[in-house]
Image (tube, rainbow, N blue to C red):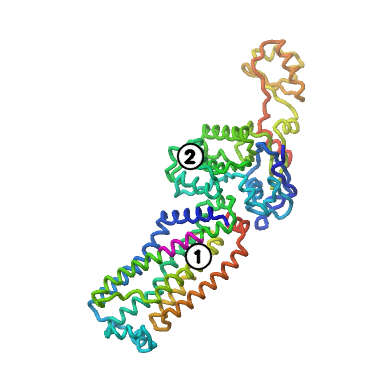
C-alpha cells in the first residue's frame, strides 16, 4: 500500500505555547486510523497542519507526496474535512450549503448533492435553514459536505459527537463502506473510543503534541496487557475446581468464573481443563477494549 | 484565480447580507433618508418658504458671488430667483457628498461582515479548508461588497433623480437633475471610494474578532465624507466635476496601494491563526 501521509519531526506553537512537538507518524492508503488523545493534545492541530491551513515551524509533512505549505490547494482538493463545529451557514438551507461548497470544490456531478442528502437522511429537510437543524443533522450535513468532491482522504474531527446511537452507528457503517468500496483513507479524531474500536485498522495515541504510541489493537494489547482476565460462563462451581485452577481464580459468582493468566497461550489449556469438569457456554478476555488500552498507555507514558 | 469560487462566495455573501436584518436594514434605511426623505422635505419646504431668508445661509449666498464664469453661473442666473438657485445648488452639489455615504456605508457594512462574520458564524475554518486560493476568497468577498455598493449607488441615483425632478418640476418647469458632476460621482468617485472602503474594511475584518468591532473601525472612512459635506455647506470646497475627478483619482490611487500591500501580505496561514485561535 502506498504511503499517503508522512509526518516527521514536526513542531508547531501558537503564541509561545508548544502545540505540536516532534510529531512523527505515517498512514498508508486505504487505512482507517484513529487519532486519540485528551483535549488539547494536538489532534485538531495535526489535521490543520496536514491540510496546509497552518504551517509547521520545523519538520517535514507530506500528504499524497505533496508539501502542504507549497501545495495546500491540491491536497485540500483530494481530502475532505469535517471540523468539530461542522462549519455550515445557519441562514442557508441544507441544500444551499451543499451547493455553495459544491462550487468551491469545483464538483461537476449535479446529482451528487441530492444523492448525499438522501444517503444521510436529510432529503426531507433539504430546504430548511441549517440554523433550525438538530446537532445530529448538522453533523450529518457536515459529513455530506466533506464528501461532496469524493475525496481520497477523509479527516473527521469528532464525527459522532451529538449523534444518537442509531445516527452514530449509521455513520460508522457508512465510513466503513466508503473505505471498503472506494478505498478512502480515513483519519478519525474522537473521544468516544467505543465507536471506533472495531472501525479503525490502527490507532495513534497522542499526548502533549506528540504521538506516544501507535499500532493495531492487538499490537497494543500484546505490549500493554501483562495479564489476562478470562470470564467464563459455566455451570462449574468454584468447589469443583482443581487446586491449580483455584490458584488462577480471581472471582466467582452465579454461573460466572473469572480467571487470571499470565500469558495468552495459557488460555486454551485453561479452557480444556474446565471442559473436563463441565459445560462452558462462553468465554471472553476482559479489559482488552480500546478504552482500557488508552488508559494503560496514558499511565505507562506518564 | 478561481472564477467559479469567486462567483460562489460573492453570491453566498450577498444572500447572507440581504437575509440578515441587522446588516441589511441600515443599508436600506440610510439611502431612503438621504436620497428620498431629505430631498423631498427640502423641495416641499421650498414651495412654501423662501430658503434664502433662512438663517445660516450667508456662506452659501457668498458662494454664489464667488462662482467662476461658466455654464453653472449661466444656469443659476437663468433662474433669476435666489430660492431656485439655492434649490439647484443643494440638489446638485450639497447632496453629492451625502450621496457618497450610501455606497460607502453599504460597502463598509458588507466588507466588515466578510471575514469577521465568517469567524462569528464559525464558518471561516471550513472556508479556509476549501481548495480555493486565498486571493479568490478575498476577491469573492470584495466582489459581493462592490456589487451591493454599486447597486445601491445606481439605484439611489435613479430614485433621487425621480424624487427631485418630480417635486422640482412645478417650480422650475424643467428637469434640474443631474448636473455633469453627478456622472463623475456615480461612475468614478463612487466605485473608487467604495473599492477603497471595501479593501480597508476587509483588511480590518481579517484582523479583528467580530463584526461589531470591524464595523466600528469603518468610521475612519465615513469621517472624511462628513468632512466633505461640511466643506460644501461652509463653502470651503465646491464639488464640481474637476474636484470630483481629483477625489476619485486619489481614492483609486490609495485603493491600489492598499490592494498591492494586501496582496503581498494576505496569507492563509496568518488569517487562520489570527481568526481561528
Up/down of B33 relative to A266, above or below: below
Is B60 situated left or right of A136 in this image?
left
Which image quadrant is residue A261 in?
A: top right
User: Residue B253: where, in percent of width, then height?
Assistant: 54, 73
- Same subunit under labels 2 and 1? no
Q: Residue at x 63, y 56 (%)?
A: B269
Q: Secondary structure at mark 1?
A: helix
Up/down of A9 relative to B111, above or below: above
User: Residue B134: where, in percent of width, then height?
Assistant: 59, 57
Q: Which mark is residue B198?
A: 1
**Camera-side residue of A118 and B16:** A118
Q: Answer few, some or many: residues within 10 Å of disc 2's Cα (few below 14, many 20 plus, some between 14 and 19).
A: some
Q: Is residue B145 magenta?
A: yes
Query: Which residue in the protein does label 2 denote?
Result: A114
In the rendered image, the quadrant that contains the N terminus of chain B is bottom right
Q: Chain of mark 2?
A: A
Q: Is residue B111 magenta?
A: no
In the rendered image, the quadrant that contains the C terminus of chain B is bottom right
**Camera-side residue of A26 and A265:** A26
- Boundaries of the magenta span: B142-151
Q: Answer few, some or many: residues within 10 Å of disc 1's Cα (few below 14, many 20 plus, some between 14 and 19).
A: many
Amino acid at each position: 500500500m502506498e504511503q499517503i501521509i508522512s509526518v516527521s519531526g514536526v513542531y508547531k506553537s501558537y503564541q509561545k505555547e508548544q502545540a505540536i512537538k516532534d510529531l512523527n507518524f505515517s498512514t498508508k492508503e486505504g487505512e482507517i486510523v484513529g487519532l486519540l488523545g485528551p483535549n488539547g493534545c494536538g489532534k485538531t492541530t495535526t489535521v490543520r497542519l496536514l491540510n496546509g491551513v497552518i504551517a509547521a515551524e520545523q519538520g517535514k509533512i507530506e500528504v499524497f507526496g505533496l508539501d502542504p505549505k507549497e501545495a495546500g490547494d491540491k491536497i485540500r482538493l483530494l481530502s475532505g474535512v469535517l471540523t468539530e463545529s461542522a462549519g455550515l451557514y445557519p441562514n442557508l438551507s441544507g441544500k444551499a450549503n451543499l451547493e455553495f461548497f459544491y462550487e468551491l470544490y469545483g464538483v461537476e456531478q449535479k446529482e451528487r448533492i441530492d444523492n448525499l442528502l438522501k444517503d444521510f437522511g436529510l432529503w426531507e429537510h433539504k430546504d430548511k435553514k441549517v440554523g433550525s437543524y438538530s446537532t445530529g443533522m448538522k453533523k450529518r450535513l457536515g459529513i455530506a459536505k466533506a464528501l461532496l468532491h469524493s475525496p481520497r482522504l477523509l479527516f473527521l474531527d469528532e464525527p459522532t459527537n451529538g449523534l444518537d446511537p442509531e445516527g452514530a452507528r449509521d455513520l460508522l457503517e457508512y465510513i466503513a463502506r466508503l473505505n471498503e468500496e472506494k478505498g478512502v483513507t480515513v483519519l478519525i479524531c474522537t473521544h468516544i473510543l467505543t465507536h471506533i474500536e472495531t472501525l479503525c485498522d490502527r490507532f495513534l495515541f497522542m499526548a502533549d503534541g506528540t504521538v506516544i504510541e501507535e499500532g493495531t489493537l492487538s499490537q497494543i494489547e500484546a505490549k500493554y496487557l501483562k495479564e489476562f482476565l478470562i470470564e467464563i460462563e459455566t455451570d462449574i462451581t468454584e468447589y469443583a475446581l482443581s487446586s491449580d485452577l483455584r490458584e488462577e481464580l480471581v472471582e466467582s459468582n452465579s454461573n460466572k468464573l473469572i480467571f487470571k493468566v499470565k500469558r495468552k497461550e495459557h488460555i486454551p489449556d485453561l479452557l480444556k481443563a474446565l471442559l473436563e469438569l463441565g459445560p462452558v457456554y462462553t468465554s471472553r478476555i476482559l479489559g482488552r477494549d480500546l478504552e482500557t488500552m488508552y488508559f494503560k498507555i496514558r499511565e505507562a507514558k506518564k | 484565480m478561481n472564477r467559479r469560487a469567486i462567483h460562489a462566495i460573492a453570491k453566498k455573501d450577498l444572500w447572507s447580507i440581504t437575509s440578515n436584518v441587522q446588516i441589511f436594514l441600515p443599508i436600506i434605511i440610510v439611502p431612503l433618508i438621504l436620497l428620498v426623505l431629505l430631498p423631498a422635505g427640502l423641495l416641499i419646504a421650498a414651495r412654501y418658504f423662501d430658503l434664502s431668508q433662512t438663517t445660516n445661509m450667508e456662506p452659501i449666498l457668498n458662494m454664489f458671488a464667488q462662482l467662476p464664469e461658466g455654464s453653472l453661473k449661466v444656469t443659476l442666473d437663468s433662474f433669476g430667483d435666489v430660492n431656485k438657485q439655492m434649490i439647484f445648488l443643494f440638489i446638485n452639489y450639497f447632496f453629492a457628498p451625502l450621496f457618497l455615504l450610501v455606497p460607502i456605508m453599504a460597502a463598509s457594512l458588507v466588507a466588515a461582515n466578510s471575514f469577521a462574520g465568517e469567524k462569528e458564524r464559525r464558518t471561516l475554518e471550513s472556508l479556509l479548508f476549501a481548495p480555493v486560493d486565498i486571493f479568490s476568497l478575498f476577491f469573492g468577498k470584495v466582489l459581493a461588497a462592490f456589487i451591493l455598493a454599486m447597486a445601491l449607488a445606481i439605484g439611489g441615483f435613479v430614485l433621487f433623480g425621480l424624487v427631485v425632478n418630480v417635486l422640482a418640476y412645478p417650480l422650475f418647469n424643467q428637469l434640474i437633475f443631474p448636473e455633469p458632476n453627478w456622472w463623475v460621482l456615480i461612475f468614478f468617485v463612487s466605485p473608487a471610494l467604495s473599492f477603497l472602503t471595501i479593501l480597508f474594511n476587509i483588511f480590518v475584518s481579517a484582523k479583528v474578532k467580530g463584526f461589531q468591532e470591524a464595523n466600528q473601525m469603518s468610521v475612519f472612512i465615513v469621517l472624511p465624507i462628513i468632512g466633505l459635506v461640511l466643506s460644501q455647506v461652509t463653502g470651503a470646497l465646491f464639488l464640481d466635476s474637476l474636484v470630483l475627478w481629483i477625489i476619485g483619482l486619489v481614492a483609486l490611487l490609495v485603493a491600489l496601494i492598499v490592494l498591492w500591500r494586501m496582496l503581498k501580505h494576505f496569507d492563509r496561514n496568518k488569517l487562520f491563526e489570527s481568526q481561528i485561535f
